[in-house]
Amino acid sequence: MSSMFLLHLACTLVMTGLIWFVQVVHYPLFARIGKREFAGYFDRHLKRTTLVVAPFMLGEVASALLLIVTQDPVISHLRARLSFGCLLVIWLSTATLQIPRHRALQLGQTPEAVASLVDTNWIRTVGWSARSALLLDLLRVGSAIE
């Protein structure tokens, strides 16, 4: 396996673990924060979360593009594109669903806003889980070839 693939896999596995934590623990707990404290809490949440996830998300997309462009012989071009397609769905969901819901929460916490964020975030949770499964299968197949 190439070092680029292993970097890509590592970024994806980290993001998969993070998204499950966010989906099951972090986002649902937004509903438990008092309305008065929520604005300050949410501001800190955005800044700190960005520091953690941005390097992995950017590394993941950059390495995904490189895997497609370089056409690693162990990774089929079809699988690389399928994996990248899942990543596009994740990024589109982030841009069109999660960011607007985060902006709505910046204006004020409501049970409906929190529930909407949790519900729509399942797209990213499933997307990263599918990517992890696909990439781990590629690792298994690629390791068998080598």
Image (cartoon, rainbow, N blue to C red):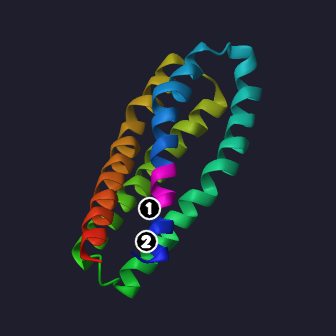
Question: Start and end of the magenta stretch?
Answer: 10-14
Residue 39 x/y as whole percent: 73, 27
> Splitting the image into 4 quarters, where does residue 143 fall?
bottom left
Residue 120 x/y as whole percent: 39, 36
Secondary structure, mark 2, is helix
Q: In the rendered view of the protein, which quadrant contains the N terminus?
A: bottom left
Residue 33 x/y as whole percent: 65, 16
Measured Cα–Cα span from mark 1 to mark 2: 6 Å
User: What residue is at 35 percent from the left and 46 percent from the top?
Assistant: 129
User: What residue is at 57 percent from the left and 34 percent from the top?
Assistant: 104
Badge 2: residue crowd in 10 Å (few <14, some 14–19, many ≥20): many
Mark carried by residue 29: none
70 lies left or right of 58: left
Q: Is residue 11 magenta?
A: yes
Which residue is more in the foreground, 94 or 108? 94
Report the residue marked by disc 2: 5
Q: Amino acid at mark 1?
A: Leu
User: What residue is at 46 percent from the left and 52 percent from the top?
Assistant: 13
Q: In the rendered view of the protein, which quadrant contains the C terminus?
A: bottom left
Does the residue at mark 1 contact the one at mark 2 (Cβ under 8 Å)?
Answer: yes
Report the residue marked by disc 1: 9
> Would you say the magenta stretch is mainly helix, strand or loop?
helix
User: What residue is at 46 percent from the left and 68 percent from the top?
Assistant: 6
32 lies left or right of 94: right
> Splitting the image into 4 quarters, where does residue 89 fall?
bottom left
85 lies left or right of 19: left
Which residue is more in the foreground, 52 or 106? 52
Q: Is residue 63 above or below residue 98?
A: below
80 lies left or right of 104: left
Q: Amino acid at mark 2?
A: Phe
